[in-house]
């Protein structure tokens, strides 16, 4: 087969994504007969691993079983990645069965995070399918003693048109297994015009089973002789158990055991490892949960009880008046540029801590076998580090831990941390029998790795034409022992860095004892609100159209230097043409240019955000009711994640869901810390968005000629500032603190 | 205590404390795990089942309060015409993301259409407000309810102002 590429060949993309890690393909005969193909990321995998790790199995009856390597958290990867293999293999989708992989190094990275599933696997998964197809063609050619180039394969059949002969993949599968596996880099991928599955609306492979009530989620796991556990930790982060009324608890009906576990280290709380707590074991989860009400624990004090949301606000106000702790970027001379500016703006922005609140509470089922090996069933986004955490916590070799990835009832970044896995494994070892640990909702909300709050002191200078010439952010964020807390950083290349000549990003840290961590679009879910709202302030101050100001700031069509590769991924360079593309598309679809014809009291707001390799612009149309409650009329989004939407079913769903997720954050969500503990306990106080608050949405994909990238996260950030900017146009009142306070938007409000 | 309950047309004898929520009887005694635990305070709707055709939150319904009511769960909802149509629409529109809330959504939607086969958007809001979807698939839930009802699925709610 020829290795040439054409303009519409995915491999010909300028600045395209490539997996930089070497992958190897191995072929063999599947158990029960047929072709088995394995993609290896190292050559050290054992023969057994090769069997376990099969990506493609073709049975003699033509049924193709494809392994989904990554966890399914609702992002659709269990459907998307097999689609890539199946299309290149060229089989009918209805003849495809998808099986969830276990954690195994043979697959390389297995995780759901960073919107990386698509960019990391777009090419390798297609190559696996194409290689299998090539082997089937070779098998047919050898069976017929004809040149492979005369054979064609499609829809599960290889044909030899000159002779009219044909054989099904099933009939060829054993012979194909004897063919040498091709070098992955040598296989030719389809042209987009040849796709039969990619680009088609394809429902989730497990959706019907979910609606039948099948036991797919972590919480549904059941093992023989399994007990149920609850694990109560200190409401104050990092608190140690001094004593607990264990004897009383053990005497309660249905309770089998109650015992204290000791935390792994002093900083385990902020590191999301095992922390001190009391385990209650019962034959029924409800009995263990009821026993919690009788549990009395004396927790040891630590430094945390002084921590509070109001204290953070006071510290931030103080730090804002002082010199910053550090300068993280300095371009030009901001002070001089501000002195020469025709107009100067200052504003303070703040946003709260947030919890992930996955609807499936954290849970894990664990069994410690007689030989000391451990088996884990968990809804996790990140099984590899989970196994490492269990290994460290139990003091055993990670190779002795098997992790089954269940379907995950929501991730949003919460389950990148695997604290619940360490707890279940420790409880199972103590007990010597299988156990299912299930958190209740207050435990879930009060023991998270929170999206950190933050404070921004912005200053901008505009020239006489209204163009920003100076920009400063004193970012007051959170740290632990002088290091910026997880997901509390301001990237030094964050817009408008590089686009305003005189710019300074300064930073000060508030010491924090509360765990923080990544939440869907870490950084962006907070920074977009602050930066894109302040940019809107600059536009209004200058009397400029917010769209025109953005187009001017991003400037002429150009491609900026690419940042270094990360997690095995070459990062494509930032392309201002893609910014312009989505801004102009969303303006057109929303009728942005006609917004001044809207009735008084109705406004439109615009925002753009680049994140996770995706370019997204959104417009919100909104007003407020007499109580100041925002009424969202409609939201438009324009999204550029490359030339190919692999599965429109999943893509529109991800974009719509991310927008509404962000809307809920803007309208309702906050976590309050008092005396070192989280105040909110359940969904009555932590108000997730509900049906009647979900406005009409329009999502438009702009198909630029770039390799496809991920969509779990990029559509979330712009909606927060777009809404606040719309409310400014509607009411003249600027939202600088989240969540939005309707009191501040009432017509009578100052 | 012993209770005799009727679930999806099948009678079960169960042993449980009187205050045990129906949710845990279904999940841990009868192994009907399609009904999900989300909050324990009837705030999220993940545990929605039908009692005599009315949606009920199983997490706050004590087993002792069930009495002779006919219980239908997600495992049995497909036996009814509206349940079958709702499930089909859910799959045709690929409503779910993580799917954890969707059993509860389907139960609430089926109860709605059983009583009101041509719901307005306001009717849908009222019937579905107790069911949180953390993935925010509300756009498709609304469309799927309309599709099951044979109504146009386009979202026409934009305020024309």
Image: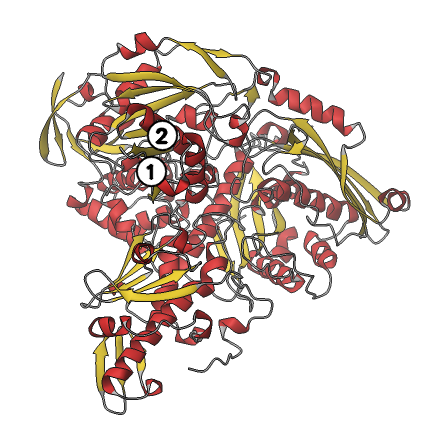
Q: Chain of mark 1?
A: A
Examine the image and state in which quarter residue A650 appears: bottom left
* In the foreground, A320 or B85: A320
- SS class, disc 2: helix
Mark 2 nearby-residue class (10 Å; few <14, some 14–19, many ≥20): many
* Residue positioned 22% across, 41% down in the render: B114
* Residue positioned 70% across, 66% down in the render: A557
How far across and how far down the image is residue A15, in percent?
60, 67
Q: Which mark is residue A477?
A: none
Q: Is residue A381 visible?
A: no
Q: Which residue is mark 1?
A: A376
How far across and how far down the image is residue A316, in percent?
70, 26
In the rendered structure, are the residues bearing label 1 and label 2 in contact, judged by CB atoms less than 8 Å apart?
yes
Quick one: quadrant of the C terminus of chain A?
Answer: top right
How far across and how far down the image is residue A634, in percent?
51, 48
* In the foreground, A674 or A52: A52
Q: Which residue is mark 2?
A: A424
Quick one: quadrant of the N terminus of chain A?
Answer: bottom left
């Amino acid at each position: 087969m020829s290795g040439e590429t054409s303009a519409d060949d995915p491999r010909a993309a300028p600045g395209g994504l490539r997996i930089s890690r070497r992958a190897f393909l191995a072929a063999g005969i599947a158990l029960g007969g047929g072709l088995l193909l394995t993609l290896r990321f190292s050559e050290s995998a054992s023969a057994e691993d090769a069997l376990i790790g099969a990506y493609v199995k073709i049975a003699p009856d033509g049924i193709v079983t494809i392994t989904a390597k990554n966890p399914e958290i609702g992002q659709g990867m269990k459907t998307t990645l097999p689609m890539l293999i199946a299309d290149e293999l060229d089989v009918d989708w209805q003849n495809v069965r998808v099986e969830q992989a276990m954690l195994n190094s043979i697959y390389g990275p297995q995780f759901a995070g960073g919107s990386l599933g698509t960019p990391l696997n777009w090419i390798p998964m297609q190559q696996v399918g194409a290689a299998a197809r090539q082997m089937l063609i070779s098998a047919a050619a050898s069976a017929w003693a004809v040149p492979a180039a005369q054979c064609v394969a499609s829809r599960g059949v290889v044909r030899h048109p000159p002779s009219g002969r044909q054989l099904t993949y099933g009939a060829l599968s054993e012979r194909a297994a004897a063919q040498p596996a091709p070098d992955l880099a040598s296989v030719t991928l389809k042209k987009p015009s040849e796709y039969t599955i990619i680009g088609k609306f394809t429902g989730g492979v497990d959706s019907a089973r979910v609606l039948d009530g099948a036991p797919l989620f972590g919480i549904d796991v059941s093992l023989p002789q399994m007990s149920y556990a609850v694990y109560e930790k200190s409401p104050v982060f990092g608190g140690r158990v001094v004593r607990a009324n264990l004897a009383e608890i053990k005497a309660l009906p249905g309770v089998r055991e109650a015992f204290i576990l000791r935390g792994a280290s002093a900083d385990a709380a902020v590191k999301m490892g095992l922390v001190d707590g009391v385990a209650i074991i019962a034959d029924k989860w409800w009995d263990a949960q009821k026993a919690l009400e009788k549990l009395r624990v004396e927790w040891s004090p630590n430094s945390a009880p002084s921590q509070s949301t109001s204290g953070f606000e006071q510290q931030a106000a103080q730090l804002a008046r002082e010199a910053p702790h550090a300068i993280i970027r300095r371009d030009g001379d901001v002070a001089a540029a501000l002195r020469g500016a025709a107009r100067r703006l200052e504003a303070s922005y703040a946003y709260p801590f947030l919890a992930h609140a996955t609807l499936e509470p954290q849970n894990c089922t664990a069994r410690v076998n007689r030989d000391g090996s451990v088996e884990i069933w968990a809804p996790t986004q990140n099984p590899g580090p989970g196994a490492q955490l269990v290994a460290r916590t139990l003091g055993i070799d990670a190779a002795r831990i098997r992790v089954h990835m269940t379907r995950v009832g929501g991730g949003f970044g919460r389950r990148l941390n695997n604290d619940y896995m360490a707890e279940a494994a420790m409880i199972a070892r103590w007990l010597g029998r299988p156990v299912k640990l299930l958190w209740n909702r207050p435990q879930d909300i009060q023991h998270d790795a929170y999206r950190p709050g933050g404070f921004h002191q912005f200053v901008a200078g505009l020239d006489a034409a209204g163009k920003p010439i100076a920009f400063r952010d004193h970012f007051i964020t959170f740290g632990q022992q002088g290091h910026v807390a997880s997901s509390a950083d301001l990237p030094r290349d964050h817009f408008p860095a590089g686009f305003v000549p005189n710019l300074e990003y300064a930073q000060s840290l508030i010491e924090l004892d509360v765990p923080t961590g990544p939440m869907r679009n870490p950084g962006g879910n907070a920074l977009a609100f602050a930066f894109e709202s302040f940019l809107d302030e600059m536009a209004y101050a200058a009397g400029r159209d917010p769209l025109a100001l953005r187009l001017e700031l991003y400037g002429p069509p150009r491609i900026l230097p690419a940042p270094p590769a990360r997690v095995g991924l070459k990062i494509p360079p930032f392309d201002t043409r893609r910014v312009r593309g989505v801004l102009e598309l969303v303006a057109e679809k929303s009728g942005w240019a006609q917004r001044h014809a809207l009735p008084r009291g109705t406004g439109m707001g615009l925002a753009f955000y680049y994140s996770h390799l995706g370019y997204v612009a959104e417009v919100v149309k909104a007003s407020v009711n007499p109580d100041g409650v925002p009424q969202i009329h409609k939201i438009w989004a324009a999204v550029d994640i490359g030339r190919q939407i692999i599965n429109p079913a999943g893509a529109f769903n991800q974009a719509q869901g991310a927008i509404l997720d962000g809307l809920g954050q803007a309208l309702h969500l906050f976590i309050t810390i008092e005396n070192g503990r989280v105040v909110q306990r359940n969904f009555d106080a932590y108000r997730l968005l509900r049906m009647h608050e979900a406005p009409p949405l329009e999502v438009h994909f702009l198909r630029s000629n770039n390799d496809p990238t991920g969509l779990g996260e990029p559509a979330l950030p712009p909606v927060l500032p777009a809404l606040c900017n719309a409310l400014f146009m509607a009411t003249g009142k600027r939202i600088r603190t989240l969540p939005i306070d309707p009191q501040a938007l009432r017509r009578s409000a100052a | 205590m012993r209770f005799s309950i009727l679930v999806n047309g099948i009678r079960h004898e169960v042993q449980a404390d009187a205050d045990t929520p129906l949710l845990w009887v279904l999940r841990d005694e009868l192994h009907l795990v399609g009904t999900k635990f989300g909050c324990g305070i009837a705030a999220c709707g993940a545990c929605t089942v039908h009692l005599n055709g009315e949606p009920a939150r199983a997490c706050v319904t004590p087993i002792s309060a069930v009495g002779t009511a006919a219980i239908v769960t997600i495992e049995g909802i497909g036996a009814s015409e509206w349940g079958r149509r709702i499930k089909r629409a859910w799959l045709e529109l690929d409503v779910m993301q993580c799917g954890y809330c969707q059993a509860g959504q389907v139960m609430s939607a089926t109860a709605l259409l059983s009583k009101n086969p041509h719901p307005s958007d306001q009717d849908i809001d009222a019937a579905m407000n107790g069911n949180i979807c953390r993935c925010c698939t509300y756009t498709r839930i609304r469309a799927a309810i309309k599709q099951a009802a044979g109504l146009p699925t386009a979202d026409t709610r934009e305020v024309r102002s």
